[in-house]
Image: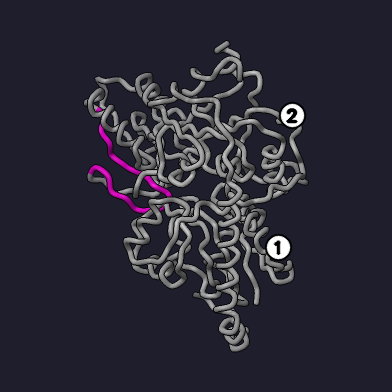
Amino acid sequence: MKFGLIDFDLTVEWYWKNSWNNKALLNIGDAAEYLVVEQLYQEMGITEIDIVRLSIKDLTAYRGESLIVAMNIALDSYVGYNDILENLSPDIIPVFLGMCFADTNMNEKQLRCLKTYEPVGCRDERSYVYLKTNGIDCYLNGCTASVIDIPEEGSLQDKEGKILFIDVPYKVADYIPKSLKKNIAFLSQEMYCRKEELPKEFVPSQWAKGVMAAYKNNVKLIVTSRFHGAVLALSQNIPAIITLEKYTFRFSWIQNYFPIYTEENFREIDWNVNQIDFKDVKSLIKKIAINRIKDVAEKYQDILTITDLQKNNKHYAQNSSNQVLYYEDALEEIRKKWNKNKNITYAFWGINDNADHLFKYISEEFPNAKLVEIYDMFKTIKYKGLVSKHPDELRNRIKENDFYVVITAYLAARVASDICESIGFRDSNIIMCKRKFVSQDNLNCND
């Protein structure tokens, strides 16, 4: 019997080869989610010879010897929402350890997949309640990456004794005590790039381990808006402060251990955070994960063995918001570029809370502006009487000087410039919602 392991290097390579612009989003959270499963396998005595490494896309594409695959992942737009549930490979038996569902409008086939392989470990309360309501046996586990053993390699000695700022919202800068500023170091948890933009010897998993090693160097405090920034802090018993532009359901579990602040109360941040003793909970999460993998292996071992023996060798073919608000820069750009007396047409790329706020503002302040299109890369949605199109159709608007596309979604902002450039759409007519984070310049100018 074999075990499948989602592999960070293979996943990044898949995106480099298959994404439309040959770019991949390298995210420390993804790497931690996959690495912790590998460590659980090792602790169970599962050797490399019994492991088949997969990319995230292989969860639907894989065909071959039957695999048991432990999963601790978020199903979001980056992995095609619930496509994995709907089109899971028939040769994969999943063990759902710590799942997050960004889209809770599941169809019958998706729910049936979860029902077949229940119980489902959920990492947030919204996912847990949704599955319970739909008759699926589940439990509230949190993210299994909280039990990760961070490797020592590539340790960042300059981070020792520091306060790590990991994508801290820009507006927090006004409330940072002067006494702390000299101890702040900045850590980035993701890259979006082509393979050719990196050194030839670059290995995604080694880069990820190097970044994670920063948590091993006697860090005094972590301040972050990143979910896995907080999860990795928890895994190392490092005090953390979570700073969010807007609260999101993903943090429902983690708020049991760390204080969460949003824009409304950044001024109330208590910078003296006590260390949390997570040891007992950590042991229980690990125990449950290992027992669940063992139970599934025992249940399916004979069934999978006989199935593989009898297979033909020939291959065969076969919305709660998670959105923070960061539209201020887009508003400023609209004020600069748009004339209130002119007939302007515009489109939203991505529909979320940012789009709602922008639509309200534009309707009130620019009466001659009209929303005429909406775009989405991943799914068909309806908004204000319009049905979404793929962004490639922006090519039909190239000659319209007074047509603007407003990018409201985080992932869309990553690829919008490349897509627009490839089809010849003017950069000057792109208006972007961007998140702003505290930087070293902020610390200097606020002294």
Q: Amino acid at mark 1?
A: Gln
Front disc: 2 or 1: 1
Residue 84 percent coordinates (x, y): 48, 63
Q: Is residue 136 above or below residue 329?
A: below
> Callout 1 environment at 10 Å: few (<14), some (14 to 19), or many (20+)?
few
Q: Is residue 250 left or right of residue 64?
A: left
> To which quarter of the image does residue 182 belong?
top right
Q: Which residues are magenta?
A: 369-384
Nearest the eye: 418 or 269: 269
Per the model, the C-alpha gap separating discs 2 and 1 is 31 Å
* Residue carrying label 1: 42
Q: How is the image coloured?
A: one colour
Quarter of the C terminus within the rendering:
top right
Quarter of the N terminus within the rendering:
bottom right
Which of marks 1 and 2 precedes in the sequence? 1
Residue 270 percent coordinates (x, y): 50, 25
> To which quarter of the image does residue 212 belong?
top right
* Residue carrying label 2: 158
